[in-house]
Image (cartoon, rainbow, N blue to C red):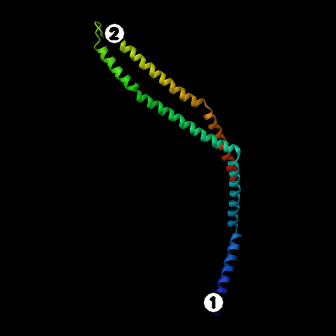
Amino acid sequence: MEKVKSSKLGDIRQTASDGVEILRQLGTPGVQETLDKVGKMTVNIKELMEIMNSPGWVKNIENIRKISEDTNNSFSKLEDTFSSIKETGVIEGAKEMMSSVKKTIDSFNPQGDAGQELKDMGSTFKEVLYSIKILVDEIRNTVGDSRTSDTIHELQQTVKAVKSSYQTIKKGVK
């Protein structure tokens, strides 16, 4: 029994001694400097969280989401357009037409039906080229619409706001 009491008493002394040592170390300049830095970082993080919850930041994040959606929609439209081109066979038709025109020109005989066939092929080839021109104009308009929309302007504003916030935070950390 006496041995148990002295063991417990020794444990209490050791714990008290360890507590005093911890308190002594907390008072050293290195630990104080580290705790000051942690405190400053905590203040900066709190300010950053407040900034990120501000209406401006919320709007910037929403703008980034819209930009992402617009970009995805543009890519989807372009993919659909290219799929349509492949499905219609316009490119393959143009290749075949070129081959046929070349063969016809090579075998051109001004007598008989060959001259009329050449005219018909020329007309058909013009129609194919006109269809391709319309398709190219449609693609240009789609790309032009995405360039002239507010998407790019919103992205620029968002980038400026993020840079400004970064500079503010960077100054606060120093």
Which amino acid is tagged 1? Val
Q: Residue 66: x, y in percent?
A: 60, 39
Structural crowding at the residue carrying mark 2, measured as other residues with C-alpha within 10 Å and reported as few (<14), some (14–19) or many (≥20): few
Asked whether residue 81 is in view, the answer is yes
Relative side of 151 to 107, left or right: right
In the image, taking residue 3 as reference, residue 107 lies left or right, namely left
Q: Can you tell which quarter of the image residue 67 is in?
A: top right
- Most extreme residue toward the bottom is 2
Q: Position of residue 165 (x, y in %)?
A: 68, 46
Q: Is residue 155 above or below residue 46?
A: above
Residue 79: % across, % down: 47, 34
Where 32 falls versus 154 (above or below)?
Answer: below
Q: CA distance from mark 1 to mark 2?
A: 121 Å
Total marks placed? 2
Residue position for label 1:
4
Which residue is rendered at x = 55% and y = 36% of the image? 71
Residue occupying image coordinates x 49% and y 32%: 78
Q: Vertically, is 8 above or below 95?
A: below
Residue 37 percent location from the top left of the image:
69, 60
Looking at the image, residue 64 sits to the left or right of residue 131; the answer is right
Residue drawn at point x = 35 percent, y = 20 percent: 98
- Secondary structure beneath dot 1 equals helix
Q: Quadrant of the N terminus?
A: bottom right
- Indicate which disc, 1 or 2, sits on the residue closer to the N terminus: 1
**What's the amino acid at mark 2?**
Gln
User: Residue shown at 33%/9% (left/top)?
Assistant: 116
* Mark 1 Cα shell of 10 Å, populated few (<14), some (14-19), many (≥20): few
**Residue at numbered disc 2:** 116
